[in-house]
Amino acid sequence: MKIAVCEGDGIGHEVIPPAKEVLKHFLPDADYFDVFVGYDKWKETGESSSDSDIALFKSSDAILFGAITTPPVPEYKSVILRIRQELDLYANLRPVKGSIFGQDFDIMIVRENTEGLYSGIEEIGEERSTTLRVITKHGSERIAKMACTLSIERGHKMPLVIGNKANVLKSDVLFRDSCIKTAGLMGVKTKPMFIDALTFDVLMHPLSYDVIVTTNLFGDILSDACGYLTGGLGMLPSANIGEKNAFFEPVHGSAPDIAGQGIANPSAAIRSAAMMLDYFGMKKEAGIVEDAVIKVISSGVKTPDLGGKNSTKEAGEKILEYIKKI
Ligand code: NAI
Ligand code: MG
């Protein structure tokens, strides 16, 4: 098994090492190799990622990724977008877990990752700029299939919610209807909801949701908004899945404001490692890691973003210690 590891920039250097330790505990014989991409690389070499970096990522079974800084300069090419496109990582999975009124919620946001408003087809002018929103039947059906598979795996506890805005954006009629058709073929009940009302309702009633499928931009915003339910960006993991490759990263960025201080919350990165284990079919092991993260935090070991005083290293070590005891 080949696992590419990219710390990236900023707090990536701090949160990825403890996540890698967790992977090494469960997969001691895997071949781990580092790939250097991102802003630091751009400053050194003039390119943020090379063709051979992309080839290395493609040769792996899975990628553990930190975060990279994207400076707002037009000549800088976003590495994340390049990886998503060239590896065709069409499904972005973002679990949102927590508890409210003493009851646990567990929502899976399934975001289409390759088209929609992030297709990169734009015309930029002084007076008028446009961005083309591309929705295809193929793209909608394959993301719907992924969402339905997850819904079934999770026991199809609630209908699959289809986040859309088909009342205003006619391109979303194709998305919504392709999802309904695919779900029908797979025996999954659906509930289309308009994305604005949906975002509000998830925050109000998180216990009423299981799997939500939506388009690229809507999924980006919805999943960040749901971060509110979980104790912050330092808690949220994600997976980007394609036919051949898979990429696991915390939702947060490189956090230059706290980088180098050793106080970043490693939970999101460690949970991303758990999602990798789940992807490899190691569901029990993934569950142990999830459990460890929650138990260690509830025992009072917390980084400053959660109101505690512990360092990244201390939090990571406690989580690994807990895992090793099981
Ligand atoms: P950010 O997620 O890096 O930081 C937002 C806020 O959350 C900051 O106050 C930060 O200190 C805090 N934070 C984030 N992760 C944390 C953690 N693990 N523990 C404790 N606190 C944490 O987002 P921001 O500031 O908008 O972006 C910074 C850089 O990261 C930018 O260059 C941006 O382009 C890049 N970025 C990269 C992403 C990626 O690689 N996938 C995703 C988002 C942003
Ligand atoms: Mg985002």
Image: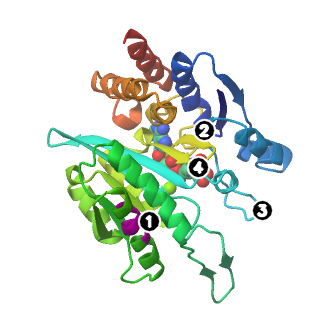
**Residue at the spot 59% in from the left edge and 42% down from the top edge:** 246
The residue that appears at 27% across and 64% down in the rendered structure is 200
Q: CA distance from mark 2 to mark 3?
A: 23 Å
Residue 98 in picture, x, y percent from top left: 28, 40
Asked if the residue at label 3 sits under 8 Å from ligand 1, the reply is no
Q: Which residues are magenta?
A: 178-183
N-term mark: 1 or 3: 3
| Secondary structure of the residue carrying numbered label 3 | loop
Q: CA distance from mark 2 to mark 4?
A: 16 Å
Query: Would you identify the image quadrant in which residue 323 lies?
Result: top left
Classify the position of the C terminus by image quarter: top left
Tag 4 residue? 242
List the residue tagged with mark 2. Answer: 65
Residue 112's place in the image compared with 299, above or below, is below
Q: Is residue 13 or residue 96 the one in the foreground?
A: 96
CA separation, marks 1 and 2? 23 Å
Mark 4 residue type = Gly
Instruction: Please indicate whether residue 130 sits to the left or right of residue 273 in the image.
Output: right
Screen quadrant of the N terminus: top right
**Mark 1 or 4, closer to the camera:** 4
Does the beta carbon of the residue at mark 4 sit less than 8 Å from ligand 1?
A: no
**What residue type is disc 3 on?**
Glu
Q: Which labelled disc corresponds to residue 218?
A: 1
